[in-house]
Image (cartoon, coloured by chain):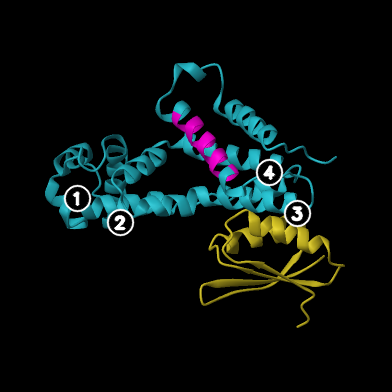
């Protein structure tokens, strides 16, 4: 899997991971992939809602060692 | 004859009544007998679900302090400059607390009693504001859109203003601010804060 940009949102509470994701994804071209790493448990629902509202695709969502990792493909 | 509540329903009803009483009078001001009387049951029923008043209080607090707001709409619906998002976040938060001010009272009680939950209230409630303000001010300063401002102190200033507005309107119901609705108060206060840090959104 090719990751085009990575966003480290560890330690940040809502809404910062979403606002950072919005800015990061704006830098990508259609079809490129953004990886987001977050620690806020609320980010799981928030990233899902973000993708629904913005039309971007949530390709993967998982957690490991208290961190949440998301792969978003720009529409 | 009224239907007997299932165990989980009974537990939930105990927590709901206990929350109102603890929020109003604090841990020491509420007796188990009073909670039982409000519920129309004997104290023995309460002890079937919670071994002690302390255990019940801890559970009420842990529910109250675990509540988190989602600011996704505040973040995405509307202009995305710092001031606009901050105002929308504060409005979401205030609306939630206005719908149930017991949460705010529980937070005050937890702070007075030096309960471990006091820190959780910060982590789950106020840290969103602290993070957002600090991070945004640092970023705006790097971009040359803000002068030299201590982000942590600015964040404390805003949280202090917001907390005071919430106390005045929801707890004290102060006559001094009667002519302002809570949303109006938050809008004016946010505007004053943005002027104080000399923030003007770029058009």
Task: Tell whether label 4 touches label 2 (CB within 8 Å).
Answer: no
- Residue at the image position 21 percent from the left and 56 percent from the top: B49
Task: Tell whether label 1 touches label 3 (CB within 8 Å).
Answer: no
Q: Find residue A16 and report its image quarter.
A: bottom right
Q: Is residue A17 above or below residue B150?
A: below
Residues tagged by mark 3 and mark 1 found on one chain of the structure: yes
Question: Chain A's shade in the image?
Answer: yellow
**Circle 1 is placed at which residue position?**
B53
**Circle 2 is placed at which residue position?**
B8
Labels 2 and 1: the sequence-earlier one: 2
In percent of width and height, residue B115 lies at 31, 51
- Residue at the image position 78 percent from the left and 45 percent from the top: B145
Q: Nearer the viewer, residue A42 or B81?
A: B81
Mark 4 falls within which chain? B
The alpha-carbon separation of the residues under discs 1 and 4 comes to 41 Å
The residue range painted magenta reads B154-167
For label 1, the SS is helix
Q: Is residue B157 magenta?
A: yes
For label 4, the SS is helix
Labels 4 and 3: the sequence-earlier one: 4
Q: Is residue B4 above or below residue A20?
A: above
Chain corresponding to cyan in the figure: B
Q: Find residue B27 and report its image quarter.
A: top left
For label 2, the SS is helix
The alpha-carbon separation of the residues under discs 3 and 1 comes to 52 Å
Residues tagged by mark 1 and mark 4 found on one chain of the structure: yes
Mark 1 falls within which chain? B
**Circle 3 is placed at which residue position?**
B142
């Amino acid at each position: 899997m090719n990751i085009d940009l990575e966003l480290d949102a560890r330690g940040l509470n809502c809404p910062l991971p979403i606002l950072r994701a919005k800015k990061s994804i704006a830098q990508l071209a259609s079809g490129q992939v953004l990886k987001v790493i977050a620690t806020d448990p609320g980010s799981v629902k928030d990233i899902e809602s973000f993708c629904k509202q913005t039309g971007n695709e949530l390709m993967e969502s998982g957690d490991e060692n208290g961190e949440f990792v998301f792969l978003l493909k720009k529409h | 004859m009224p239907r007997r509540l299932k165990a989980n329903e009974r537990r939930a009803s105990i927590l709901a009544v206990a929350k109102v009483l603890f929020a109003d009078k604090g841990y020491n001001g509420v007796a188990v007998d009073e909670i039982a009387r409000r519920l129309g049951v004997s104290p023995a029923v309460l002890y079937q679900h919670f071994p002690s008043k302390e255990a019940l209080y801890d559970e009420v607090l842990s529910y109250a302090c675990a509540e988190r707001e989602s600011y996704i709409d505040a973040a995405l619906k509307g202009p995305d400059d710092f001031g606009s998002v901050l105002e929308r976040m504060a409005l979401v938060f205030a609306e939630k607390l206005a719908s149930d001010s017991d949460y705010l009272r529980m937070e005050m009680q937890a702070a007075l009693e030096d309960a471990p939950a006091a820190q959780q209230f910060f982590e789950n409630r106020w840290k969103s504001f602290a993070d957002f303000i600090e991070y945004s001010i640092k970023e705006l300063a790097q971009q040359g859109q803000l002068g030299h401002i201590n982000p942590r102190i600015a964040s404390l200033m805003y949280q202090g203003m917001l907390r005071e507005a919430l106390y005045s309107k929801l707890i004290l119901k102060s006559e001094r601010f009667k002519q302002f609705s809570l949303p109006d108060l938050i809008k004016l206060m946010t505007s004053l804060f943005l002027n104080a840090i000399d923030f003007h959104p770029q058009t």
